[in-house]
Amino acid sequence: MCGLLGVVDYKKNINTSLFKEMLDSLKHRGPDDEGLEVFSLDSCSIFLGHRRLSIIDISSNGHQPMLYEHLAIIYNGEVYNFKDIRQELILNGYSFDSNTDTEVILKSYHLWGTHCVDKFRGMFAFAIYNAKQQEIKIFRDRAGVKPLYYSLTDDALIFSSELKPLLNYPDFNKDIDFEAVSSYLQFGYIHAPKTIFKNVQKLLPGHYLKYDIASKNLVKECYWNINDFYENQVATDNVVDELESIITEAFNLRMIADVPVGVFLSGGIDSSLVAAIVQKNSKIPINTFTIGFEDKRFDESNYAKDIAEYLGTNHTELICKKEDVLATIKKLSKIFDEPFADSSAIPTVLVSELAKKQVSVVLSGDGGDELFCGYPSYALMEKRFQLLSKVPFRKKLKKLSNVLPVPTFMQNKVNKKLYKKFIKFKNMLDHDDIVNSFKVTNSVFSKDEIKNLIQADYYFSKDTPATTSNLEKMMISDFKGYLPDDLMVKIDRSTMSASLEGREPLLDNKIIEFAASLPISYKKDKEILKNILGRYIPKDLFLRKKQGFGIPINYWLREDLKYLLDQYLSEDLIKEYNIFNYNYVSKLLELFYAEKNDDNKVWVLLMFQMWFSENIDSNKCSR
């Protein structure tokens, strides 16, 4: 795993020293090596930089930027089937100076051009500068495992693995995008392609950019879309055996490394499946890691320990204490480039630091829920939407709900949960499809609350539902949004903060495409994954209610961590940063302390304020 940075500088006001300073902000992504190439043209200077975490061919032969004829590449990720592609290239007359997948990608592009990406199985973000055609192409993997940010102005194109280098760019505009703030308040993360800054975007998964240096013309193209594989669903009699074979191959490919590899084991179905199959195909005990909590309501470490003992792995666990949480919270605003409120980032950072003591690569089970209908909220929302679709005169009812006051019996403390359901129902009336209704019900803050908080227009990024079942529409929406913008951000930044490479075996494109092609009856509630896992582990070890990787953050915020709220949500700081309406924030705090509720509103606000304090000079930020 690595970090990349590129700048096309038309003003020619960046020197090598400044570019290295920008590149150094990615050192945690690649502590093993640094590379820099400068190409001087009449119209601009082109800087390509790379920080390397050595995983495959750890010799100096893997140094980047890597050059071949008129091409130069900077690359972050892993292409796991690179050996097969390499043999194909050799048959086409190519020779190799290294054993890296970087050289395979570079020469694949030389032979096949843009279509080379169709051959790659893995996670990647890479940029190729073509000196002959004076263009740059930038690619991101199908599932969005690896990040890519870019900013285009009249004076420069900047692209990077993280936002940190852009913040070090002298002319960078830090103006906040309030539509992105609205997105953050809804979900606790920012939906791509938006970022927290007006002038920066995320490259969407399965897309590439083509930039013409002379004309400054930037074109975005999609090379892969999961929707295509949902349209032609088929299933054979031996579908379980087929999927197990595909999974086994994909998992074994992700064990290829010239450094030690381990597995994050939570005790759930997905991570247990990864550990079980990898262990079966390993000659020695694999390393597994888990985080537990002193509060037993949130502790799954015993489940992970039981599975590790059954599989015979070399298992390491850490029981997370309040002191660990506090220390990690203070790091979050540095680790994450944007406001990010998924509190499970805390144990993910801690388990990454734990794993790094023994391994340099770790596998996780992310993606199983989105591909195999694992979230209980899918089935719940399907029932709700069926009821909602039977409501007559929906538009008139919506108008009426906006005029009439909230029933008095919902306003007392006993009926607060009923009131919240009423608000979600009211907001669902805005949408005629299950996907956008689903997004509304998952929002932390409602439309009216957001308008009160930021005193700006409410922004809602509507999905275009696929032509498939309601359950699969929600799965596709999460695959394109929640998975890359929350889960993959969490795992990438958390592992990279410890200079650890995180790999997602369930997000192999062959697994994704096979899962999408299966009828929903095979996938619902992960039935097919359970059947496969039952071949490796007794079912009583993994069949239980889904718990998630949560922590008692609200309890701690009312007790030991209350001082964080006193500091960052104080009247002085709220008014100084000029993002949120303090009167509304104070009311939320009052309810938070009085009602002992478990919603995430206060945590979401705290994470934004801590991020702003760390990354933005309030005097240089405009609305």
Image (cartoon, rainbow, N blue to C red):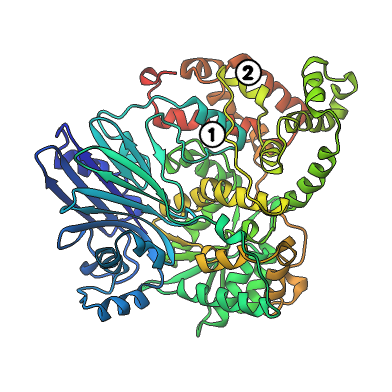
Return the residue nearer the eye: 159 or 563: 159
Residue at the far right in the pictured view: 409
Write the residue at 56% across / 16% down. Answer: 571
Q: Quadrant of residue 237?
A: bottom right
Q: N-terminal of the two: label 2 or label 1?
A: 2
Q: Position of residue 137 (x, y in %)?
A: 30, 51
Q: CA distance from mark 2 to mark 1?
A: 19 Å
Question: Looking at the picture, does residue 397 appear above or below residue 328?
Answer: above
Q: Position of residue 123 (x, y in %)?
A: 43, 60
Amino acid type at circle 1 is Met
Q: Position of residue 45 (x, y in %)?
A: 15, 41
Q: Quadrant of residue 594?
A: top right
Q: Quadrant for the N terminus, please.
A: bottom left
Amino acid type at circle 2 is Asn
Question: Looking at the picture, does residue 131 appear above or below residue 169?
Answer: below
Local SS, label 2: helix
509 displayed left or right of 87? right
Pointer 1 local density, CA inside 10 Å: few below 14, some 14–19, many at least 20: many
Look at discs 2 and 1 and give the one toward the viewer: 2
Q: Which residue is mark 1?
A: 607
Q: Quadrant of residue 430?
A: top right
Return the residue nearer the eye: 4 or 299: 4
Local SS, label 1: helix
Return the residue nearer the eye: 136 or 165: 136
Asked whether residue 525 is in view, the answer is no
Q: Which residue is mark 2?
A: 452
Write the residue at 21% across / 42% down. Answer: 213
